[in-house]
Image (cartoon, rainbow, N blue to C red):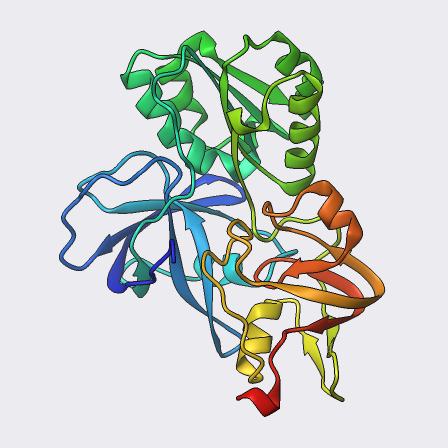
Amino acid sequence: MRFVETWIPATLVSTRDLSPGIREFLILPDQFDGAAYPVGSHINVSVTIDGQPETRSYSLVGEASPQGFRIAVRRTDDSRGGSRYMWQLAPGARLDITRPASLVAVDWARDNYCLIAGGIGITPILGAAQALARRGANVTLHYAVRSRADAAYLDDLANMLGERLVVHASDEGRRLDLDALFASLPKGTLTLFCGPMRMLDAARHAWIGAGHPLSDMRYETFGSSGTLPTEAFRVRLKGSDVELEIPRERSMLDVLNASGFEVISDCKRGECGLCAIDVVAVDGEIDHRDVFFSDHQKQSNQKICACVSRARGTITVDTLLRADAV
């Protein structure tokens, strides 16, 4: 397994509001050594939602610091409850977190780097910008936001990158044109991206359309972002009379496992594909929120990543768990 969840106790040291809807949390693990972690690392945080223990994943902001781990959480009503839980925490709160882990591999020997962040996607991109700026790399950061007031860490990035920071604020009429941007990049440019699912889909199509190999684009997305609103849906189990309701605040993976239908998993971020299960029928619509499957695989609706993807209506799945084989 790529992610071994070693849980450690920690304390919420402080919070600060970066914008009206984004709050930063400084978390200090017990016996913290301040060791460096890879670019694009995240931690899992144990949260309680409607009395149920849940896990939420947050990207670490910036490079390692002796003060602890920094995460930034956008408060949103269309979520599964993680942001509401985090925002009600006060300094001094005790937390259980995992050690940092990353699936983003950065080739530090490239001639050119393009960083792209959409909204709260700036959290993992900030550390990459710091590392590349420190190395004197040829790097440009494109930051897409609704307005500059919504742009977390904008002053830090401007001081670090100067004219190499390009802000695309919708309220200023400066929307990010991915087709034009990627067409202008030299071959061999490594692009790092983090943003919502729709923006990622557009980025991948534009990247391929510009003739760049997909392997030169490394990306993350938000496990809670999708094309449909986050709402409750139902899951039927093939070969049984079992039908489960997946509430808006819980994942299909959690509900299946809690109900005795074991589904193995690893990253719980829609990146590794280990929790993918077969889809037998769809009475409604699937909202694929993973970054593991290709566009063609998502359109076929033959499998679903149980950790992040959701649906509208009812879907029938086959977990391959057979009672007579247990």
The N terminus, quarter of image: bottom left
User: Which sits in the foreground, 204 or 181?
Assistant: 204
Q: Is residue 47 above or below residue 288?
A: below
Quarter-of-image position of residue 7 = bottom left
User: Which sits in the foreground, 104 or 142?
Assistant: 104
Q: Is residue 139 above or below residue 98?
A: above
The x, y position of residue 304, in whole percent, is: 67, 59
* 230 left or right of 105 in image: right
User: Which sits in the foreground, 221 or 65?
Assistant: 221
The x, y position of residue 141, in whole percent, is: 49, 19
Quarter-of-image position of residue 302 = bottom right
Task: Residue at the far right: name it.
Answer: 283
Q: How many marks?
A: 0
The x, y position of residue 36, in whole percent, is: 22, 39
User: Which sits in the foreground, 122 or 210?
Assistant: 210
Q: Residue at x 40, y 30 (%)?
A: 126
Q: Residue at x 43, y 50 (%)?
A: 58
> Is residue 250 at all visible to an observer of this figure?
no
Q: Residue at x 38, y 53 (%)?
A: 2
The x, y position of residue 143, in whole percent, is: 54, 24
Q: Is residue 141 above or below residue 264?
A: above
> Is residue 165 at all visible to an observer of this figure?
yes
* 105 left or right of 173 in image: left
* 100 left or right of 214 in image: left
Task: Residue at the far bottom: name it.
Answer: 324
Quarter-of-image position of residue 321 = bottom right
